[in-house]
Amino acid sequence: MPIISTEDNYLTVLNLFTTDTPEHQDQLLTEMRKIVDAATYEGWISSTVHAGQDSPGTANLIQWRSGEDLEKRYSGEEFKHRTLPVFREITTAIRLLQNEIVFTQTHPDLAGRIEVSPDRDDYTVIEVLRVAEADQADLVKLLGEGQHWLVNVPGYRSHSVFRGLRAMFVEGAFAVVYSQWDSKESYDAFRSLPAERKPEPRRANDERIAELTVAGDSNTYRVVHTRAAGA
């Protein structure tokens, strides 16, 4: 199963698709499974497909050896003339985000290991935050090191912070947070905590993140399929 780690030096691509109905989400998942199960691309490491929970959509977390390998995929006739047109027909938005993993943290029970697999029951959250390029490094630090207190939040399992490198269909600098929780209830309780009840470290960190963030959005997911090179 794929592992999220700062030690691997992989290029991590998050392909995020939104759509308007559960039926279109099912179509997206079918098309994504086909691509993942047939993948033989040079430099491709793994792909893990996620099904949207709060809103219809999908996410594919893909690990590549390098940006050069990914560009070969993007420049291919299959991607340009079949893959993208198929997805455009059944989506309302497409974002193909290339990222560098810069920070990971887990609850002590996970001993620092972040696994991404349909065999786990993680309630997964993916947040995309747009930021001025000059503020990207500060935002990434706040999202990672600035949230050490998360280990004490009920239901928290892990979070990983990615620095956006470049993207298709997204303008400007960005950062991504990929987090795992034990349930929707735990995550909702964490997100809905009133500001006056937040511990001071969290309140100060949240306020600074809000100041730096130009725009942001998130969705919640369950992992439904994965495959790695050689499998």
Image (cartoon, helix red, strand yellow):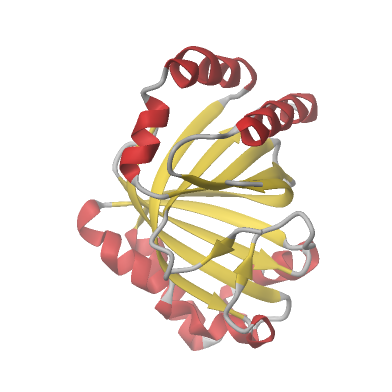
**Quarter that holds the N terminus:** bottom right
Q: Is residue 117 above or below residue 95?
A: below
Q: Residue at x 66, y 43 (%)?
A: 49
Give x and y (percent) for residue 4.
Answer: 53, 64
Q: Residue at x 74, y 51 (%)?
A: 222
Quarter occupied by residue 172: top left
Q: Is residue 190 above or below residue 224?
A: below
Q: Does 115 sit left or right of 44 as displayed? A: right
Q: Quadrant of residue 140?
A: bottom left
Residue 24 is left or right of residue 91, and the answer is right
Q: Position of residue 54 (x, y in %)?
A: 72, 46
Task: Give the camera-side residue of 161 and 47.
Answer: 47
Comparing 192 with 24, the one in front is: 24
The residue under the point 43% across, 65% down is 8
Q: Position of residue 206 (x, y in %)?
A: 46, 71
Spot occupied by residue 36 in the image (x, y as percentages of width and height) = 63, 36
Residue 77, visible in the rendered structure: yes
